[in-house]
Amino acid sequence: MSVQRPAAEQPTTERPRTEQPTTDRPRTERPTTELDARYSSALHPRPGAADVAATEWAEARRRTEAAEIYWAVTMRPGGGPHITPVIAAWHDGVLYFSTGPGEQKARNLARDAHCALLTGGNSLTEGFDLVVEGEAEPVADPAVLEAVIAAFEAKYGAHITSAEGTFHGIGDAIRRSDDVLFAVAPVTAYGFGRDDGVYSHTRWSF
């Protein structure tokens, strides 16, 4: 939940927006993939870690698509980070999340579109963390809105579709622009694996 600042402190200058979001640019599902051995078990191998390798992007996507909570990182006007949990879903190679137009992160993104979305676990010896960096662009295309709303409903099920669901009505809120839908096409991403205590650090460049 974003902390609302007094109206007098709200930024008065928004960055220019184009008619079409940058997610219309060509995207690739085959980014450049690199293993950073400095932060992997390749540097200090333990049993079973001698052949540690970079994680393929398709595998990273598969392992994190089911994640129910992501953390959205945006930049405050003063330069400090603002971090909040959000729900998010992939569609056509792009990661989407929404927020109210008056929320702190929406105001931050109006000034500076650079952001990161993070998800993962908190175990030291198992799991996979993913960091996606890019620019968050508001979506206005009705066809994209409907496709992403459907992706949210398919992923979160009764949390959205049930009248008792915590996020029930989010689809209509997006359609009415009561919530702004943001698209984050990955520019750079990082994956941190810890399966059975075998550590890997992968970087993907798009």
Image (spheres, rainbow, N blue to C red):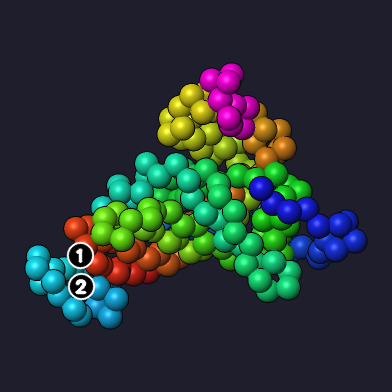
Q: CA distance from mark 2 to mark 1?
A: 6 Å
Left or right: 38 as drawn, with respect to 171? left
What mark, if any, has residue 32 been given in the picture?
Answer: none
Q: Amino acid at mark 1?
A: Val
- For residue 8, side relative to residue 38 (left or right): right
Residue 138, percent from left and from top: 63, 50
Q: In the rendered structure, which disc, 2 or 1, sits on the residue that comes first in sequence? A: 2
Which residue sits at x=90%, y=61%? 8
Amino acid at dot 2: Ser
Picture quadrant of residue 198 = bottom left
Q: For mark 1, give the secondary structure.
A: loop
Q: Which mark is residue 41?
A: 2
Who's the residue at 81% across and 57% down the image? 5
Work out whether residue 201 or residue 46 is closer to the camera in this orientation and state it. Answer: 46
Is residue 159 found left or right of 107 in the rendered image?
A: left
The spot of residue 70 in percent (x, y) is 49, 50
Mark 2 and mark 1 residues within 8 Å of each other at the beta carbon: yes
Q: Nearer the viewer, residue 50 or 74?
A: 50
Q: Which mark is residue 198?
A: 1
Which residue is located at x 73 percent, y 47 percent? Answer: 101
The residue at the point 70 percent across, 44 percent down is 100
User: Around disc 2, counting alpha carbons within 10 Å, would you say few (fewer than 14), some (14 to 19), or many (20 or more)?
Assistant: many
Q: Is residue 160 magenta?
A: no
Query: Measured from the top left, where is residue 105 in percent x and y?
Result: 67, 56
User: Magenta stretch?
Assistant: 162-171
Query: In the rendered view, does 72 fall on the left or right side of 61?
Result: right
Report the number of discs: 2
